[in-house]
Every structure is written in structure tokens, then in C-alpha cells.
Amino acid sequence: MKRKLAMSLQLFWSFLKVAPTAFGGGYAMMPAIERECVERRQWMERESLEDLLSIAAAAPGGVGVNAAAAVGFRMAGSVGALAAVMGMTVPTFALILLLAFAYRLIADLPKTVAALQGLKGGIVGLIGLAAWRMGRAAVFDVSTLIILGGTLASLLLTAIHPGWLIAGGLIVGSIVIAAKDRLGMRRRLERPRVERQREEELCPEYFI
Amino acid sequence: MWTLFWTFVKIGCLSFGGGYAIMPVIEYETAAHGWMNATQFHELVSLAAMAPGPIAVNSATLIGYEIAGIAGAVVATSGMALPSLVIMALLSLVLARGAELPLLRKVLYGLRPVVAGLIAYAGLRMILPSAAEGVLSWTFLGTLAIAAGCFVAMVKFRLHPLPVMIGSAIAGIVLF
């Protein structure tokens, strides 16, 4: 128990240090997490960490929090997972509340309104990039294109909860894969790789 | 408070694809509960984007704060993080072998297009209100220009998001 506690404190501290690198998305954190967990603390092998990270990317929740939970759990059970996640979340939590306070004070200034409008543009740019990258990795055959189209149509035209769309996509995807297997059709599970393809395009989840 | 907590737990469970893909879900729930209107929501999202940390979690924090002060912020954030914790813990057990299951790829096949759609939708929701005065309005075109600029900056020049965001805020002051 004592060891778990000590380990949990270490976890908390390590992830606390990693947290600020989260700006801009998950990928920014990856090297930091690797450096901390594999090199500094020597908690696990690089390959194991990478496996964990791919799961972290695919599972619900942000990569960062997921990665923290996984590493924490691996090292010290539930207590460890909790400690790691808190380390990851607390600094940004405090920071953003501070930001909210500060914002309240200057919210009505015309300059602030203008800056915010500009910021919206920036965010749209960021979102555009994420959508583009994800789209390129996600859509590479007719079925995936249809799923994308269906999702957009549903979001724009109906009031269906996005959660259902996620379920729908999973179901449709499975059906398509099973059907293609049955019919003996060739199928790809991902975009065929081109040499020199950059990291961002292969693992888009890290960038959002 | 309970409603707040459970809503974010629900959101947390559905937060596939992370980041902006979650925003439509958050927006949906926020509207459904009548917590705030669209304008307030977008303002909040801009603020969440400014801060370091995942935008989704930040949004949860801010929404919680808006509704019930600091306690609300804590509740919302925990609610959102909880499913991640539990699911990841379970998954890491199951996949302890370290084998990359073809199952993962199959899941991603159907999931990713949906996520791409969600992200695209989030983007549209963010920018369309700026066209309230008309598609050719200065507000809309200016915002679009900034968006395009940021996009190019990140793709062509491989700039890190942080300076890009700061730049967009400055561009906003200049243009508007």
C-alpha cells in the first residue's frame, strides 16, 4: 500500500509536468509523455507505451487523460490512475478558471470582442485542420464516404443526438466489413500508405 | 448538480475522437438542458480553446463554472474525466498482452468517418453565426480569412497552435 502511495505521488507529479504541453492537442503531449514515462521514470518500455497510446487515442475521452489513466492504472491500480489523471487535469483546471475570471473583467471592452472574433477564426482554422486530417485518414472508400455524408447530413438536418451517430457509424462499419468478407471482396481497413507519409496523417487522433 | 454530473459522464462516454469531435455532443446537451444559448456557448468555446489543455475538458470546466461556480466546475470536469478513467483502466487490462487487435482497426473503420463528420460540423457551427449579418459581411469574411490564414500557417509552415491562436486574436483586434 505504501509503495502504491509513493508511486501515485510520482504519477501525479509526472503528469502534472506533462499537462501544460497539452496545448494544441494530444500529439504535443506524446513526446513529453514518452520522455517522462520511458526515459526519466523508466516505468515501461517504449513499445508498451505506444500500445497504450494507440488505445488512448481510440477510446472515448481525450488522448491525454486516457494516457494518464492507462499509465497510472498500470503502475498503481485505481489509485494510480486517479493520481495521474488529477495531475493531468488540475493545472489546466486552475488555469482556465483564472482565465474565466480575467475574462469577466474585460469582457465588454471592444478590443476584447474583436480579439474574440479573431480567435473564433483561429479556432475554425484549427478545427478545419483537424477535420481535414481526420477526413483524409478516415475516408478512402465508398462506404466511409457514405458514413461521413450520412453523419454530416444528420447533424445538419436532423436533431438526432450525435451519440447515436457514433453508434450508427460503428454498426454500419461492422456490417460493411462483414459483408465484404462474406462476399470475398477485397477490403482495406485504412488508407493505403504512401511512403513519406507524415505522422499526423497516420494517427490523426493525436492532433485533435 | 447531479444533472450536471451525469450529463458530463454521458458526454464523457461518447467523446470518441477527442477534442473538437466532442463539441457537437456538448453543444447538443447544453442546448437540451437550456443552460445557455448558442452565442454564449461559442464565446465559452473560444475561451476554452485559449487555455492549455484539451478543449473538451476545458469547456466542461467552464460550463460547470457558469452554472454552479467552482463546485460546478469541479463536478462537470470530474464527470467528464470519469468514464475515461474507467474505460481506459478496463481496456489496459484487456489488452495487456500488447497485441494490436485487428478489432481496433475494424472499430476505427466505421468510427473515424463519423468523427470526421463531427469535427467538420463543429467547425461549421463555429463559423456560421458570424455570417448572421450576411455571407458577404465584413465579420464573416474577416473571420474566414483568419481561419484560412491559420490553416495555411499550420499546414504550410508547420506552426504550433499556440502562436497561431495568439496571432488570430491579434488579427481580430486589427480587423474588427
Image (tube, rainbow, N blue to C red):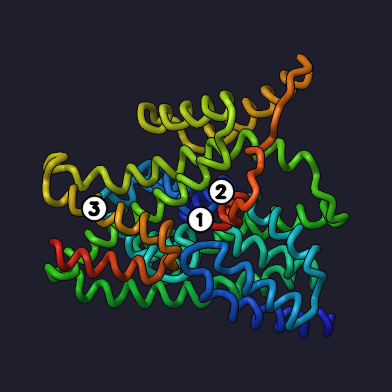
At 51% from the left and 76% from the top, the residue drawn is A20
Residue B112 horizontal side relative to residue B138, left or right: right
Within 10 Å of the Cα at label 3, are there few (<14), some (14-19), or many (20+) other Cα atoms?
some
**Which residue is label 1 attached to?**
A208
Residue A75 horizontal side relative to residue B17, left or right: right
**Which residue is label 2 attached to?**
B17
| Subunit ID for the residue under disc 3 | B
Whether residue A145 is visible, yes or no, is yes
Of badges 1 and 3, nearer the viewer stands 3
In x, y percent, where is residue B139? 15, 51
In x, y percent, where is residue A32? 62, 74
In x, y percent, where is residue A196? 62, 53
At 17% from the left and 68% from the top, the residue drawn is B173
- Seen as rendered, the residue at the extreme right is B97
Type of the residue with mark 2: Gly
**Which residue is label 3 attached to?**
B145
At 38% from the left and 48% from the top, the residue drawn is B30
At 60% from the left and 73% from the top, the residue drawn is A86
In x, y percent, where is residue A153? 41, 27
Numbered label tally: 3
Q: Answer yes or no: do the residues labelled 1 and 3 have beta carbons within 8 Å? A: no
Q: Earlier in the sequence, mark 3 or mark 2?
A: 2
Q: Quadrant of the C terminus of chain B?
A: bottom left
Q: Answer yes or no: do the residues labelled 2 and 1 have beta carbons within 8 Å? A: yes
